């Protein structure tokens, strides 16, 4: 059931379709993050109003809570959360390593990850209990989740990182991908490969070539947007994309800002995800045609304007900046909900505008117009 169609190009920017068992996804696409089977602050109907095509969930978090027994009982995540559109699940590898630096429930800093050739042993960030992920187990968990697109267990090093550590992560990620592909045989979920290599160009090329040789159903660029400068992220994306087949989808993991998305589409990327629109919304930062807006600022106290005069979301059609500011200052939960609706619709509209621009051979012009308007709000 999984198939990618490249419909058109405008420079390196690509217009395409991903066909899944739960419908067609038009690319370039942004995937709202529903880590634990929910996009924070929204009901299903509120989320659908923002017009998503696919959402992302996380294997690590769902494995810990509610657990595979519960997901299996309900027949997978789609039934559990009553969601009919496609789902992509990250393997949880990034969370295993990133959460290792956080305090456990006892409040003490302890080493929480032990990396071996077989897999990774880690302590839960919830209760400190030990668990062991192997590439095969991560595939099995995602089978139970039932997502349309799945990711293999990988090693995602932080930034900055030494060359040798980055090289080790590339080699281990590749070995684990081979095991993941074997474990996924006969399964109708699309398994993507993940290209690692940190900010080392030769490692990125080595990783991309070896991953492509395994003939995966799509290719992810991992290990970026982890603290490196934006220009370095763009450079590494360009390096990798040159080695990825045109007839397969390309996914830049964990990215990002509207500017990051536009720059990466220009370099040939098809898929994106990031917590930024939802997390920023809950903190009172809204994305608009004219840049980011701090809705808590006193200048909005008497404003009767919508958040964004160009936006068609429920929030902008019904409420003023002054009202949203009041909700945040009063610490009303509804403020977070209305802000999240707006930010996700902003991202959805951005992708619609990008796709239209590519279709009409005017992506470069669209980019110029976007930057001309953006950064004016504050």
Image (tube, rainbow, N blue to C red):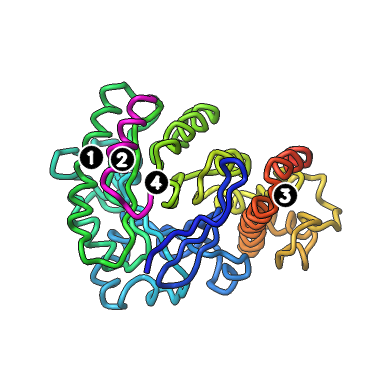
Residue 373's tag is none
Query: How far apart are the alpha carbons under marks 3 and 1?
Result: 40 Å
Q: Which residue is mark 3?
A: 288
Look at the numbered disc 4 and give the secondary structure of its residue.
strand
Is 282 situated above or below 194? Answer: below
Residue 213 is covered by the magenta coloring: yes
Q: Nearer the viewer, mark 3 or mark 2?
A: 3
Q: Quadrant of the N terminus?
A: bottom left
In space, the residues marked 3 and 4 are separated at their CA atoms by 28 Å
Front-lying residue, 138 or 175: 175
Q: Secondary structure at mark 1?
A: strand
17 vs 336, left or right, is left
Q: Is residue 205 left or right of residue 332?
A: left
Mark 2 element type: helix
Alpha carbon distance from label 4 to label 2: 18 Å
| Image coordinates for residue 55, horizontal then vertical, percent | 47, 62
Q: At which x and y percent is residue 175?
A: 19, 41
Residue 259 against residue 15 in the figure, above or below: above
Position above or below: 7 against 171: below
Q: Nearer the viewer, mark 1 or mark 4?
A: 4
* Distance (Cα) linking label 1 and label 4: 24 Å
Pointer 4 residue? 220
Determine if residue 133 is in view. Answer: no
Position of residue 375 measured from the top left corner of the image (x, y, whole percent): 74, 38
Residue under the point 43% across and 52% down: 247
- Which badge, 3 or 4, is on the more N-terminal residue? 4
SS under mark 3: strand
Q: Which label belongs to residue 113?
A: 1
- Distance from disc 3 to disc 2, alpha carbons, whole Å, reads 34 Å
Q: Are dots 4 and 2 in contact, CB under 8 Å?
A: no
Q: Which residue is mark 2?
A: 97
Q: Are marks 2 and 1 in contact (CB under 8 Å)?
A: yes
């Amino acid at each position: 059931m999984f198939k990618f169609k490249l419909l058109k190009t405008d420079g390196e920017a690509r217009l395409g379709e991903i066909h899944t068992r739960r419908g067609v996804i038009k690319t370039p696409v942004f995937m709202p993050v529903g880590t634990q089977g929910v996009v924070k602050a929204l009901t299903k109907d509120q989320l659908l109003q923002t017009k998503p095509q696919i959402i992302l969930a996380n294997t690590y978090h769902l494995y810990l809570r509610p657990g595979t027994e519960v997901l299996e009982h309900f027949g997978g995540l789609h039934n559990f959360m009553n969601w009919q559109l496609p789902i992509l699940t990250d393997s949880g590898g990034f969370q295993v390593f990133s959460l290792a630096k956080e305090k456990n429930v006892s409040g003490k800093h302890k080493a929480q990850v032990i990396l071996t050739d077989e897999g990774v042993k880690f302590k839960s960030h919830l209760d400190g209990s030990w668990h062991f992920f192997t590439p095969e187990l991560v595939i099995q968990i995602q089978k139970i989740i039932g997502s349309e697109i799945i990711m293999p267990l990988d090693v995602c090093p932080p930034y900055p990182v030494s060359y040798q550590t980055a090289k080790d992560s590339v080699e281990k990620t590749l070995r684990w991908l081979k095991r993941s592909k074997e474990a996924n045989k006969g399964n109708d979920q699309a398994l993507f490969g993940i290209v690692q290599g940190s900010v080392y160009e030769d490692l990125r090329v080595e990783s991309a070539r070896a991953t492509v040789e395994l003939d995966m159903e799509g290719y992810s660029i991992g290990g970026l947007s982890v603290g490196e400068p934006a220009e370095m992220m763009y450079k590494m994306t360009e390096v990798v994309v040159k080695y990825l087949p045109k007839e397969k989808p390309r996914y830049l993991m964990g990215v990002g800002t509207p500017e990051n998305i536009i720059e990466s589409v220009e370099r040939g990327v098809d898929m994106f995800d990031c917590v930024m629109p939802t997390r920023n919304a809950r903190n009172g930062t809204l994305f608009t045609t004219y840049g980011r807006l701090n809705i808590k600022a006193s200048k909005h106290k008497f404003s009767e304007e919508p958040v964004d005069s160009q936006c068609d979301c429920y929030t902008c059609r019904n409420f003023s900046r002054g009202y949203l500011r009041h909700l945040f200052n009063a610490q009303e939960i509804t403020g977070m909900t209305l802000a999240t609706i707006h930010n996700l619709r902003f991202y959805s509209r951005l992708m619609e505008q990008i796709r239209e621009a590519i279709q009409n051979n005017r992506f470069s012009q669209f980019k110029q117009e976007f930057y001309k308007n953006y950064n004016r709000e504050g």
